Image (cartoon, rainbow, N blue to C red):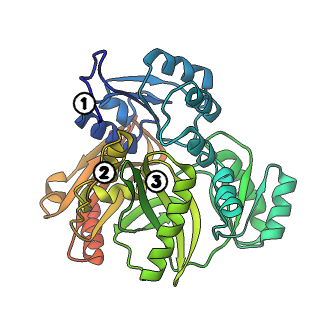
Amino acid sequence: MVKIGTPMTPVGKKAILCGSGELGKEVAIELQRYGVEVIALDKYENAPAMQVAHRSYVLSMLDGERLREIIEKEKPDYIIPEVEAIATPTLVALEKEGYNVIPTANATLLTMNRKGIRQLAAEELGIPTSPYCFAATREEFDAAVEKVGTPCVVKPIMSSSGHGQSVMRTPADADNSWKIAQEGGRAGGGEVIVEGFVKFDYEITLLTVRHSGGTLFLNPIGHHQVDGDYRESWQPQPMSETALAQAQDIAKKVTDALGGYGIFGVELFVCGDQVLFSEVSPRPHDTGMVTMISQDLSEFALHARAVLGLPIPSINFFGPSASKAVVVEGDTDKVVFGNLDKVLAEPNVQVRIFGKPEVKGHRRMGVILARGESVEDALAKAEKAYNTLEVEALPR
């Protein structure tokens, strides 16, 4: 029997979010629907989830000492990582002391960098992946490029949203790719992965939910990226029954190995009926924001249920849907969104504005959601809404 007490009382359930971006914000809201007290952590003030949480703290999640201090003070029932760059040794130690890390501390440790999860999938589970090499120094990097060949993709082993990622088309790009990887990683410079370029037909995110009743798979999500950063996604991605079965088999093997309860974003390359494993996030995925309009239980609602040990007897899919990220460029702490009345005059179109406090360079500040008669129709609606929306980046 699952029991949840009243927030802000000694009998309440308490969750700490390690990371408070737009995905964490939705998780916070869903947890609060069940009366869970939410504490939001992030490296900057007024992060999206902080704006809806009961309390918040500003810190680097790589600061294990400060992270432990807050957790020991708050004594949460659930520690929920929402970003990759976390002091995972601290989480491992805290789990051994009795704290509940979602989905598990080991899953967070393995997936916080590309090395751990790639070795688990390819070397321990025998799952097919793209060819790859790791490199910690420039000398090792040059040797890795020579072994893998060009074109290849270079990524820091710890980053997200395309930060530090580049495509190295010829050996002449080595200096630039190495520099991008060293400057763009979530934890600063360091080890990189060099991946052989895979000629795939499309790539998908297969959202996989491990919960008290077993494992569920959502309809596959297709997506477009720019420099590794999601720009639009759609659901369902058409694929053969053979490829879908293979994708689900890979997702189950990987998530079973990671263990725990929650939603996992399993990223896969698909070429015909062949499926290759790419990455997995043990948390809601940015491409999965489309589920906020495509089904009755979004990926965030499913994550909350799974984390709390609640059953998920069914997921009702409403129909073909799409999402389009609203990316703002500039250097400003004043972003204004206009024409919302015209955007929302279109049936089956929604907008989420994340409430991020500033932009430096470019930043995802919102998302447009649309549902249509087909995936193409949904994408067209999202594109029309995007072009109708006005975004002003005012001077500081």
Q: Residue shown at 58%/31% (left/top)?
A: 91
Crowding at label 2, few (<14), some or many (≥20) Cα neighbours within 10 Å?
A: some
Which three-letter amino acid code belongs to the residue tagged 1? Gly
**Could you say where residue 107 lies in the image, as x and y percent from the top left?**
57, 45
Horizontal and vertical percent for residue 10?
31, 15
How far, Cα to Cα, is label 2 from label 3?
Answer: 32 Å
Residue 391: mark = 2
Identify which residue is drawn at 71% across, 69% down.
131
Q: Tell me how far mark 1 sits from mark 2, CA to CA.
A: 35 Å
Side of 113 relative to 270 (left or right): right
Residue 35's mark?
1
Q: Position of residue 313 (x, y in %)?
A: 26, 55
- Residue highlighted by disc 3: 264
Query: Please, which residue is most extreme toward the front here?
Result: 1
How dense is the environment of label 3, judged by Cα within 10 Å: few (below 14), some, or many (20 and up)? many
Disc with the residue nearer the chain's start (2 vs 3):
3
